[in-house]
Image: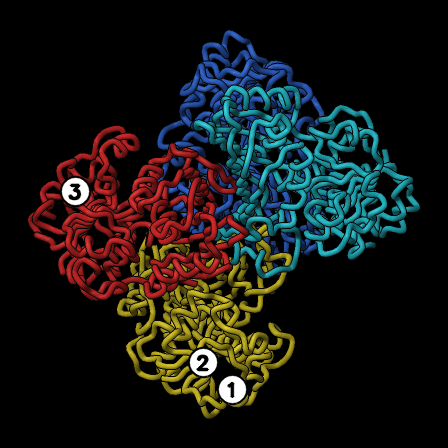
Chain colours: A yellow, B blue, C cyan, D red
């Protein structure tokens, strides 16, 4: 396979290149960067350049060169609103796995609430699919445009969806999420400096204000049940890793066993989900893996859900490759780590 | 004033000694440690030893020597269940400010639920008072035994109490707290090693399982309203700092303005509380200070509260000194920092 | 006293404002910032704004307003080459303590080697003095322009100067320094992001390539002995703190006792230097203090020196205030912390 | 292949198990732990347990069970002095790769200087070999007892040996090393707590006092040239990663080109060494890889060498597997990562 990555020098682009470097089905990797076209990958990350040696000539190219190279898959790690536009030449002819928000929210009003304007390719929203790998396998296989989920939505939706779909929970869902700093991207920002972030934690964009609220809300609503969502993200001084602690209420008569059964039914056979029961996940154990660890705790009718992912892997680049595997009918785990590193 | 610190070599004991070293009303500081009596403070922390030079001979003593020295105040930074017993010789004759849990929970059943047995001095529970400085000034002035609040209860109760007391909130309170590692104490524990904690976040003792749940629940209940509490603490890789994100529901008809008014009425004139409105507190801004920063966010009837303290200062040693100031009628801020460091 | 700070929103400017907020001799603090004039300090750092309340109206001003306010001392925390030019209106009429490099190196060629052009006010270089507080007290008292030392030179020169001046060492001096990230300033730089710095250490500008090599070399040479200097700085993932491990050779016949005697003679009575003997300093113990801790280790004729400072305090803003104290004949320690925080 | 790991629950033991889990030549992994025999690996590290699923029954065993299982290779991640004794039943019959110091130093006096007593199996010292993979391939292939190098010696010797062997350097070698905290092992120690290590750097055991001085000195001396070594390690607040900055002097007439040529001759074809020229290595780029990055800087006759490894991989478990690969004639890189992770 010949695959291309647009936006190669951000954190998700670089993570994608590393995963693709070790993917047994991928023979050629075309790394594109609008800002650094013509530069050597080795100047950005020497280890990555070494890893890609047999699959790339080691030079960053522009989008025009990607078009000429006719890749079979294009991963876009570009910013929202930019991504769908830059992917223009590939839409329709090539499989596009878009890590931006541009194809995650077919509801134009909800998209506009989050991103200030309608989705750039409104016409294609219904032809694309949402790439939460564990839930949309059929669409992922059939669609040529896959909107790869955000990191917060991935970790928030995975424990909730089995319960929401079966109608086991009701009322208000309070999700508090904690993200490593790489989730904010590789941006020249004072607020992301080591000196500003070390020894510091804070919430931001609380309640319904974070863009990912719209994405979580939309896909939670599609589960068929009316649930109210409060989503409050926090920045914590780690590089990679994302945890969510979610509080919700069980419908009357729903037992702890029913919760466990629903989670096991949904995920018992899925390679990248580990159900920990009453053990609480820790982000260190999923670091560098494509796994989501899920734990839970029931007291009477109160349910607490705990989930942990690596925001750069299951929350972005790993899930994108998982979606490529699913689309092309490869084994879902090819090129991906189930277990974390050290 | 002649003051003593029991348990000088833990994090709260050391923080106490530093604050007392700079307190203008304190002339003599007696530093006691059962495990290291006879050793020099300079061998534990040379900067602290220098700071205490004019108030201490620099040698750690045992409890017997403290009794002989007849201090006017005894701060106990000993573990729960141990503390009240070691303080025996001082109870009744000396002002005791106990940083352990032993005098925080007059409800014996609730205490036993958290600590496995009834409070060691059940007979004195009603003669002692709870030292949440902003709420119990009169009792703090009049009582000779002050149970200094836990770090989680301090940061959780401060934003909630003004609203609970006025009956502005109802139903379920979901508090998620994030604590720096110093909150776990200076213990030889694999789980607290740098290598286990860096790049890691996790919840623990969720719902009603953490000991501090009992303390928060008890003092929230005393506010007169029936509220259900879910409290889930998390460990985050910072040294000092504690944040709480609390979600609750406003009673029908309660406006955002009423929330603001209640908080301003309670804290507008209090030196150690800063009301940030819709700005969200960050732990770095309160580091090394005795301040609690509070922000809030209202959406329809949903209220999110954000609070941040330094767990070693307002969450332990700083509040203990604030209580000493209140008890003896000194200015509340003497020897304490309102603003953090750098 | 009425004092002004130019460049208030960088790390050293903010550290200066915090120290001045608590300085008993300072009644008015004028905080200037070219980029943020007109903004409120509380929007940058609410704790700092609170601390300055009685000494400032809380608004950042431009340089013109500083001139009109006629301060008695101007601290400049501006970048090199900019600083001397912006300070123009004050030179000659007001005491200027310049934290940039502009008045640290009277040797124009050496300055140009480091900064690419001659010092901006070559004419004033000999009227200014180098503000290494422990060594230039007389000049600091008499000069109206004080070039405040860099962080690396402060920590490197303090242990070396007593030995160099007495001719106890010879040959090659190999200094390896480790700095917290705040030493690089508050700059929008990818290389200073949390994600790039956590879990990472690296040397940079080795041998004689770092600008501070020139400064250290110049002031070491003035000690009268011919020493060769290799200076290699490293970035380590801490916020504040700077350590130097220096290897050099004792002249024949020089004993360990002579080393200790020279250090004690130089620093035995100085409040901000602690001599630890064969104990090795740790940066945590000097954090937030104006202290330099010094340890040493002798094996035959090999001498290893260890020094630790807080780069923002003794390495910048604290030493600047120490120099103000010395210049005006105040107690050297006024407004400064001898011991660190927690 | 059937391989066993003794000391499975320390950091190097766990790193070994992860590497072996992915090693294509290894079919069975026997994980032993004296302190936790009978426990499940999943209770220690659930991701690791998942990774080992097809190669292990997931239960920790005792040494006796290892003997019965008749493994073809035994890796010992036990402490020095203990390791050789516990390995007793395997010495002579099984390939033993010992990650402790017990077979690193055939010089009994030098061993005793570092470890307080002679090597436990003095009789076998000359039958064993030193497993610095890039330098002792022939012995590694032929010997059944391989003393796996320490982390500091690996990173210090790799850049020095090509120069020392060719006689390009002379006189005094000053090596300053910076290690992540995992290098100190998984020990219940106050000094290794997150709270003690974050925001802190310090040197320890300077000059010739660290145990690894003996190991480095011995193997540097074997290169045939008389060099004086000062080795000073530092602890820095990272988990994994080790850097060394080494200063030495070129013999008269030796050019920068000769340095480069010697390094290229030694390492140009070696998969795990990257020569960066005047680029300085950063530990983040080798994290989780078995690579050593080397940079250098020449000024006249002064040479500065920079090396970076992951202390748990090339500094311990990765090199142990590299030695297994070399011993059995597998490709040197099998099961090992050349490039780091993210």
Q: Earlier in the sequence, mark 2 or mark 1?
A: 2
Label 2 vs label 1: CA separation? Answer: 9 Å
Seen from the viewer's position, the closer of residues B231 and C277 is: C277
Percent position of residue C51, x then y = 74, 38
**From this viewpoint, which residue is outermost toward the bottom?**
A93
Q: Residues within 10 Å of mark 2 (few under 14, many from 20)?
A: many
Which chain letter matches label 2?
Answer: A
> Depth check: D79 or A242 in front?
D79
**Circles 2 and 1: CB atoms closer than 8 Å:** yes
Q: Is mark 3 in CB contact (under 8 Å) with mark 1?
A: no
Residue underneath mark 1: A65
Residue bearing the label numbered 2: A30
The residue located at (73%, 46%) in the rendering is C101
- In the picture, measured across the screen, residue A20 lies left or right of residue D107, that is right
Which residue appears farthest toward the right when viewing the image?
Answer: C68
Q: Position of residue C95 (x, y in %)?
A: 85, 37
Query: Which is nearer the eye, C233 or B112?
Result: C233
Q: Quadrant of the C terminus of chain B?
A: top right
Task: Find numbered disc 2 in the image and state the secondary structure of the residue it sits on.
Answer: strand
Q: Position of residue D270 (x, y in %)?
A: 32, 63
Which residue lies under the disc numbered 3?
D126
Do we see residue A199 in this rendering?
A: no
């Amino acid at each position: 396979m010949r695959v291309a990555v647009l936006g190669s020098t951000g954190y998700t682009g670089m993570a994608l290149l590393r995963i693709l470097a070790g993917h047994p089905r991928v023979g050629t990797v075309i790394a594109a960067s609008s800002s650094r076209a013509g530069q050597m990958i080795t100047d950005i990350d020497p280890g990555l350049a070494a890893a890609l040696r047999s699959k790339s000539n080691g030079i960053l190219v522009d989008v025009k060169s990607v078009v000429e190279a006719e890749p079979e898959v294009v991963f876009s790690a570009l910013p929202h609103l930019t991504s769908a536009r830059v992917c223009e030449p590939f839409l329709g002819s090539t499989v596009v796995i878009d890590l931006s928000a541009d194809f995650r929210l077919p509801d134009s009003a909800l998209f506009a609430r989050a991103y200030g304007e309608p989705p750039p390719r409104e016409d294609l929203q219904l032809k694309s699919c949402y790439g939460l790998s564990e839930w949309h396998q059929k669409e992922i296989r059939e669609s040529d445009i896959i909107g790869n989920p955000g990191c917060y939505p991935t970790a928030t939706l995975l424990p909730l969806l089995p319960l929401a779909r079966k109608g086991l929970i009701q009322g208000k869902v309070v999700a508090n999420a904690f993200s490593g700093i790489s989730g904010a991207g590789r941006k020249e920002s004072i607020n992301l400096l080591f000196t500003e972030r070390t020894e510091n934690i804070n919430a931001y964009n609380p309640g319904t204000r974070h863009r990912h609220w719209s994405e979580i809300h939309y896909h939670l609503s599609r589960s068929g049940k009316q649930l109210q969502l409060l989503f409050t993200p926090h920045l914590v001084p780690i590089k990679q890793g994302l945890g969510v602690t979610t509080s919700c209420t069980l419908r009357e008569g729903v037992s702890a066993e029913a919760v466990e059964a629903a989670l096991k039914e949904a995920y018992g056979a899925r390679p990248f989900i580990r159900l920990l029961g009453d053990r609480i996940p820790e982000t260190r154990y999923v670091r560098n893996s494509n796994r989501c660890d899920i734990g839970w705790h029931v007291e009477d009718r109160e349910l607490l859900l705990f989930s942990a992912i690596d925001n750069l892997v299951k929350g972005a680049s790993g899930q994108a490759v998982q979606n490529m595997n699913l689309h092309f009918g490869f084994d879902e785990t090819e090129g991906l780590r189930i277990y974390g590193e050290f």
